[in-house]
């Protein structure tokens, strides 16, 4: 009998990490396994090596899922928490359809070869009854079909819709998308249907972690959106989020983030990936206006030029072509040049270690995904199971999440409890989770808490079993390069690199 959302996190508290430095994404969709595994006696076998399928399979086994039947035709790892008839949402990271600086997007988005085994094992657990939805809400300017192509997830989804016994669909959770000019500014907005199940608004009010910033409520901002659009959601009275109803109606969320750095949050792993369950990006408080010297967390210190640049950018975004836009754009370029000539640091839009806003918003959303009901209320106990599997075959380092450099690592990581999973992977990257608020302060919520089992252990390559705290201090390090605004503020002391080992 499958475990309930309230018991699964204590039943399987382990975090599993697997790494094969030589592994690469296979080329040929839909990425069939390259050997005949016992649980797939009748499945097609691919003609090229597929180390990704093997890594995902091994990490599921390392967690102890359906342990007694591993290696037999009856092995059903997701049967521990998925039963026939359930509704399953698979949430990859489809943030962009192309790299902003050109080149490969492999370090930015979840790859279809990682999604494929997850899809297979979910379908096996459903046994022909239920449904699967693959969905995300990328940034406002992303071309969704392009992201499906770039990630190769579109090819896997098309194959699954024909080959699997359960219905498999794909959805763009965004209600609003933007059109952007070559210079990067937004020239217009377009409403679209978004989640086929619709949306549900939640107001966390005093239970929001943003409520601790009540004195600065008028400063909340989201890049590329007008201040008034964000302040209608976050102010002294309320903290509202517009959630995709498909997530709230799901029995299980299979969370498939990309392993990469993040300029605002430090890292983006399982906790940060849930931001893509929101329909309207205006309700995402990313930072507070102004420099830290004036009570904001947009950038360190103070800068009149940066303040002017922010004002100009907001007046440009969304404004149609015309003389006013041309004049504002010219002024913006002049100010940007003056900032560079003055030798000021590149931190903008909360992209640094002093951002005290974004982690609160992210943890609010994680709590809603776990505790939210489809009628807009919240339960004290988890309402669905969230299982996370992180794609680090090609990871992203440096100026993530949008401009990260692709970094071949050959790693995957998985677990049910997101906090210990992200702590372990953050330490694996070479960072100190206690120096990154998204994890260091995850236990501050008084209500609707995230699971963080005390007995959580790290299983590395199927062998070592240590506590997450011990792993964070002394475990292996991949030696990742953080985003500029985090350099010197998140690294583990004395951590050695193992990137090429």
Image (cartoon, rainbow, N blue to C red):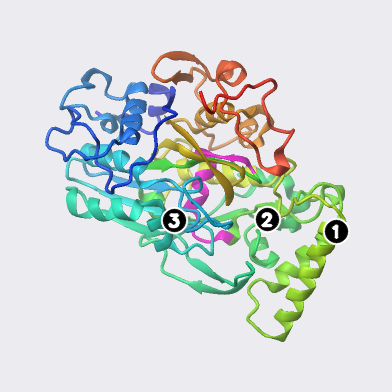
Q: Label 1 neighbourhood size at 10 Å, few (<14), some (14-19), many (20+)? A: few
- Image: 497 above or below 356: above
In the picture, the quarter occupied by the N terminus is top left
Total number of numbered labels?
Answer: 3
Q: Is residue 484 among what the camera can see?
A: yes
Q: Which residue is mark 3?
A: 244
SS at mark 1 in the image:
helix
| Rendered image: mark on residue 484 | none
Q: Are marks 2 and 3 in contact (CB under 8 Å)?
A: no
| Rendered image: mark on residue 237 | 2
Q: Which residue is mark 1?
A: 341
Q: Earlier in the sequence, mark 1 or mark 3?
A: 3
Q: Label 3 neighbourhood size at 10 Å, few (<14), some (14-19), many (20+)? A: many
Q: Earlier in the sequence, mark 2 or mark 3?
A: 2
Residue interval drawn in magenta: 265-281
Quick one: 439 or 383, which is closer to the camera? 439
Q: Earlier in the sequence, mark 2 or mark 1?
A: 2
Q: CA distance from mark 2 to mark 1?
A: 42 Å
- Image: 205 above or below 227: above
Q: Quadrant of residue 59?
A: top left
SS at mark 2 in the image:
loop
Give x and y (percent) for residue 147.
Answer: 43, 57
Indicate whether residue 269 is drawn in magenta. Answer: yes
């Amino acid at each position: 009998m499958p475990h309930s959302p309230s018991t699964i996190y204590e039943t399987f508290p382990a975090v599993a990490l697997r790494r094969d430095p030589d592994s690469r994404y296979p080329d040929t969709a839909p990425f069939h396994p390259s050997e005949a595994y016992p649980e797939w006696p009748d499945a097609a076998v691919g003609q090229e090596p597929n180390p990704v399928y093997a890594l995902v399979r091994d990490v599921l086994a390392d967690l102890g899922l359906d342990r007694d039947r591993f290696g037999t035709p009856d092995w059903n790892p997701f049967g521990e928490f998925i039963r026939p008839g359930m509704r399953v949402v698979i949430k990859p990271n489809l943030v962009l359809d192309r790299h902003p600086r050109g080149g490969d997007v492999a370090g930015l988005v979840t790859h279809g070869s990682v999604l494929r085994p997850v899809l297979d094992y979910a379908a096996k657990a459903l046994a022909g009854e239920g449904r699967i939805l693959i969905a995300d809400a990328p940034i406002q300017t992303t071309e969704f079909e392009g992201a499906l192509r770039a990630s190769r997830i579109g090819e896997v989804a098309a194959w699954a819709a024909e080959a699997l016994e359960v219905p498999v669909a794909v959805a763009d959770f965004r209600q609003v998308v933007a059109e952007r000019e070559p210079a990067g500014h937004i020239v217009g907005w377009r409403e679209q249907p978004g989640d086929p199940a619709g949306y549900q608004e939640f107001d966390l009010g005093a239970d929001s972690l943003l409520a601790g910033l009540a004195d600065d409520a008028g400063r909340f901002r989201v890049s590329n959106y007008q201040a008034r659009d964000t302040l209608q959601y976050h102010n002294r009275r309320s903290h509202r989020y517009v959630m995709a109803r498909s997530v709230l109606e799901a029995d299980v969320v299979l969370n498939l983030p990309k392993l990469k750095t993040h300029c605002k949050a430090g890292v983006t792993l399982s906790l940060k990936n849930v931001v893509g369950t929101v329909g309207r990006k205006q309700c995402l408080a990313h930072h507070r206006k102004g420099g830290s010297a004036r009570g904001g967390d947009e950038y360190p210190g103070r800068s009149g030029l940066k303040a002017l640049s922010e004002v100009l950018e907001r007046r440009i975004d969304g404004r149609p072509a015309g003389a006013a836009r041309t004049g504002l754009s010219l002024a913006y370029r002049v100010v940007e040049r003056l900032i560079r000539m003055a030798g000021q640091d590149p931190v903008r839009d909360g992209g640094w270690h002093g951002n005290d806003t974004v982690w609160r918003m992210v943890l609010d959303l994680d709590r809603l995904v776990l505790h939210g009901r489809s009628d807009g209320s919240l339960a004290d106990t988890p309402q669905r199971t969230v299982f996370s599997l992180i794609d680090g075959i090609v990871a992203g380092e440096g100026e993530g999440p949008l401009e990260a450099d692709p970094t071949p690592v050959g790693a995957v990581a998985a677990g049910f409890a997101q906090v210990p999973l992200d702590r372990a992977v953050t330490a694996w990257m070479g960072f100190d989770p206690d120096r990154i608020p998204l994890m260091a302060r995850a236990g501050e919520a008084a209500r609707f808490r995230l699971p963080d089992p005390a007995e959580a252990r790290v299983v590395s390559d199927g062998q070592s079993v240590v506590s997450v705290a011990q792993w964070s201090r002394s475990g292996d390090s991949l030696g990742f390069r953080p985003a500029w605004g985090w350099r010197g503020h998140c690294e583990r002391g004395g951590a050695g690199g193992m990137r090429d080992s």
